[in-house]
Amino acid sequence: MKRFILGTFLVLGVLATGIYVAFQVSPVPSVLAIRYIFAQGDETAMSALQAHVPPGITGQHNLAYGESPYEVFDVFYPEGTQTPLPTIVWVHGGAWVAGSKEGVANYLRILASHGYTAVGIDYTVAPKAVYPTQTQQVMDALAYLVDNAPALNIDPNTIVLAGDSAGAQLAAQAAAIITDPSYGEMVGVEPSIASHRLAAILLFCGAYDLGGVDLDGQFGWFLRTVLWAYTGTRDFMNDPEVRTASVANFVTPDFPATFITGGNADPLTPQSVRMAERLTAQGVPVEALFFPIDHEPPLQHEYQFNLDIDAGQDALDRILDFLGRRVSPAPSAIISSGDG
């Protein structure tokens, strides 16, 4: 019996050592755990949003914009749409290692009900692909959408880029490249559409300066893991190529008019505040929605997807007002009831 017990402890010790080593030499074990947690969160958020989706929204699903199985998109618009609509192209979040277009689909349906075509794109999450592959995929998706605009009810001259969390960083970087090709040369990604096609951008709860994240704070382990996976190097802070991912350092006056927001209890909100300040300093029209530090209830990361709280509904109303002033939705396509 003693030999059995000792043998069991030996096996457990070897397994524990193996797990520890695995976590030290690769971000994959941690990424798998993060991916599972994010998937559960996406499912919960989209289930809650279902009650706010009005009838009368249709679309096309899992269309390919490239050759990779990850290079697919969904498109939503009001039933009966026969003319191009101002188009919102959304890049999903997930810390660059998780998430999918399905995780934002109901929010896009709600936006579409207000007279827009709304597109959700997928891309290859890290570490299967590393920076700047995902930025290139966003650019490829935009090119495909413009080239195939009539079949998708897209107005190719009125495109609004949008993104949440990591998707906000990707959307912002794509917008910066489109409006400043010299920045694209530094990143290694060429603009795929003309800057005049980009009417505005919506940024939610993003990370825009990787050098400004707190790697020693409460979320240090998480940030180190996802940035290691995304950049492909554990020493990402000292990699000169990675510095170009900090899009806040490269914005110009030509960056599109911006709506930006973050919750008062979101650890990434200081990044959104700094991004808004840098855009404003460049003379870019910015509409920011931030909240007092003592706001109740505390607004966590991705608060905007919760339309069952006043702040989430306020964000949606502010978005629609911002879009109404920057682009003109099709009045005949607006669905006026059942959208919460």
Image (cartoon, helix red, strand yellow):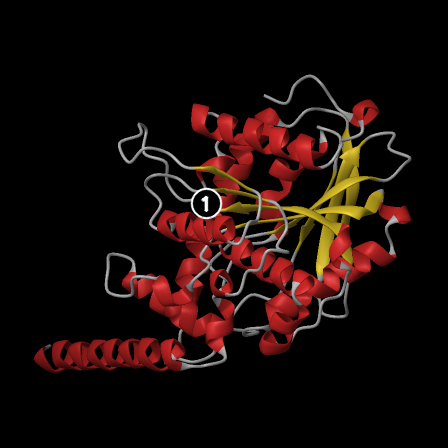
What's the residue at 86%, 40% (across, down)?
Answer: 84
Q: Is residue 203 visible?
A: yes
**Toward the viewer: 55 or 95?**
95
Q: Residue 165 or 158: which is nearer the viewer?
A: 158
Horizontal side of 130 relative to 86 (left or right) equals left
Counting from the top left corner in percent of width and height, residue 52 is at 59, 25
| Relative height, residue 113 to residue 168 (above, below) | above
Residue at image coords 86%, 58%: 147
In this picture, residue 49 sits left or right of residue 198: left
**Residue at the image point whose x is 44% and y is 64% from the top:** 32
Report which residue position mark 1 lands on.
41
Which picture quadrant has residue 235?
A: bottom left
Question: Is 44 positioned to the left or the right of 16 in the image?
Answer: right
Tell me where residue 280 appears, x and y as whole percent: 50, 48
Q: Quadrant of the C terminus?
A: top right
Towards the viewer: 294 or 322: 322
The N terminus, quarter of image: bottom left
User: What amino acid is at disc 1?
Assistant: Gly
- How many residues crowd around disc 1 within 10 Å: few (fewer than 14), some, or many (20 or more)? some
Q: At which x and y percent is residue 178?
A: 69, 62
In this rendering, does residue 307 appear at all? Answer: no
